[in-house]
Image: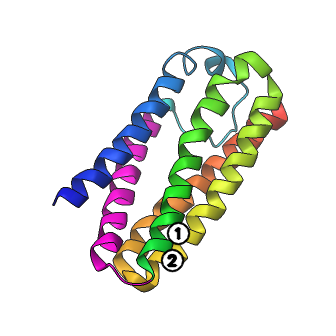
Amino acid sequence: MLGLLAFLAASALVAGLGGLATATNVDGWYATADKAPWSPPNWVFGPVWTLLYTAMAVAAWLVWRRRTAETRPALTAYAVQLVLNLLWTPVFFGLYPVLGTPALWIAFGIIVALAVAVAVTVLCFGPISRTAGLLLLPYLAWVVFASSLNLWAALNN
């Protein structure tokens, strides 16, 4: 059970640090930004990310519990995607007031790398724990969706 708590804590840390970057900017520059027509209202992001971070933590815990030869590379892929996840929010939200549109393009590069890293993590998790791999699929879908929002923002702001 301590393992699960550790993975949940890691997810909460990433979510919390991301929240710091969005706190002042969601109501700042982002409030008046040109957003994609398919962009959901801001209130959707919190609940969605809460579910996704929880599913991510449970998936990692399921893989960690198996402790096979494939576990270490799978958890390394997980760590890489978690770091990319952590980087995206401050770059997208926090750097825009400093760099302008180039920050959105840098964030787009990060989120594309994140999508690839999540896909690799799904492929690594699946053979170890089918449930773990499946738990990451909504996350992958959301990251691809978020990539489209980021691309729109980079093209139109």
- Marks 1/2: CA–CA distance: 5 Å
Asked whether 64 falls inside the magenta stretch, the response is: yes
- 68 relative position to 81: left or right: left
**On screen, 142 above or below 125?**
above
- Answer left or right for 23 relative to 6: right
Q: Are marks 1 and 2 in contact (CB under 8 Å)?
A: yes
Quadrant in the picture for residue 66:
bottom left
Which quadrant is home to the C terminus?
top right
Front one among 146 and 16: 16
Q: Using residue 101 as the reference point, say whether residue 144 is left or right of it.
A: left
Q: Is residue 79 magenta?
A: no
**Could you say where residue 20 lies in the image, as x and y percent from the top left?**
47, 24
Q: Is residue 90 visible?
A: yes
Q: Is residue 157 visible?
A: no
Q: Which mark is residue 124?
A: 2
Question: Which residue is drawn at the image coordinates 84% and 37% (left, top)?
Answer: 155
SS at circle 2 = helix
Q: Residues within 10 Å of mark 1 (few under 14, many from 20)?
A: many
**x%, y% of residue 123?**
54, 77
Q: Position of residue 72 (x, y in %)?
A: 44, 72
Residue situated furthest left in the rendering = 1
Q: Amino acid at mark 1?
A: Thr
Q: Which amino acid type is shown beneath numbered disc 2?
A: Cys
**Residue carrying label 1:** 121
Q: Which of the pair 21/142 is nearer the observer?
A: 21
Q: Which residues are magenta?
A: 43-69
